[in-house]
Image (cartoon, rainbow, N blue to C red):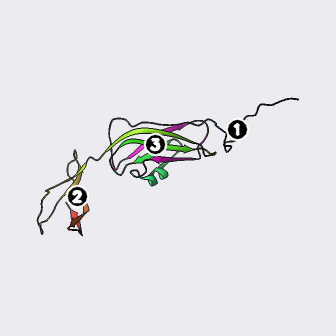
Amino acid sequence: MKCAKYTNSNPIDPLYHGDYSLTLTPFPGTEQEIFTPYTRTYATGKDTFELIEIASPTSILDTTLFEDMLTDSTITLYFTQPYQGTVTITGTRPNQRTDSAAITVNIVNPYRIAGDSLYSVGDKIAVQLRKYTESVDPNKSFSVEWSVDGAVIDTSLQS
């Protein structure tokens, strides 16, 4: 009678370990800005994950852009608000086991509203939204929503 050693090569089997790993390239530098798409590379083992997704934090990232721009080796992170901490992505295997990778980020908001800060009723207002280091572009326009004693006043502005 001969015995054969059992090797599990079925990636759907709950006991299958395979060649899975997940690493994520950290950001260069110490700060990144909001409203900027950042593409980072990630590496896996020889086996393929069924799903790559953002595990945390999801509330400050554009998850639709993440899903739309996902490739076999890159992810795109687009932060919608400042954040300091870790971003974790998770790879789900066909047998539903997961692997995670995390990077530390410091997301800052370099934008400010430039213009006078005190106005009276009836005053004409000219303000610009710009980075602290940028000069003003006089051809840009945007809308501002003002609130006075709970009543919302929506005003379109042009600089």
**Front: mark 3 or 2:** 3
Residue at left 35%, top 48%? 36
Q: Are dots 3 and 2 in contact, CB under 8 Å? A: no
- Cβ–Cβ under 8 Å for marks 1 and 2: no
Label 1 vs 3, first from the N-terminus: 1
- Quick one: SS at disc 1? loop
Would you call the spot at circle 2 few (<14 residues within 10 Å), some (14-19), or many (20 or more)?
few
Closer to the camera: disc 1 or disc 2?
Answer: 1
Which residue sits at x=68%, y=43%?
13
* Residue occupied by mark 1: 9
Q: Secondary structure at mark 2?
A: loop
Q: Which residue is mark 2?
A: 139
Residue at 64% over, 45% down: 95
Mark 3, secondary structure of its residue: strand
Q: Earlier in the sequence, mark 3 or mark 2?
A: 3
Q: Which residue is mark 3?
A: 88
- Provide the residue span drawn in magenta: 33-58
Left or right: 3 as drawn, with respect to 33? right
Q: Nearer the viewer, residue 31 or 124?
A: 31
Q: Residues within 10 Å of mark 1 (few under 14, many from 20)?
A: few
Q: CA distance from mark 1 to mark 2?
A: 62 Å
Residues at circles 1 and 3 in contact by the CB criterion of under 8 Å: no
- Name which residue type carries label 1: Ser
Residue 46: image location, x then y, percent: 61, 36
Q: Position of residue 3 (x, y in %)?
A: 83, 30
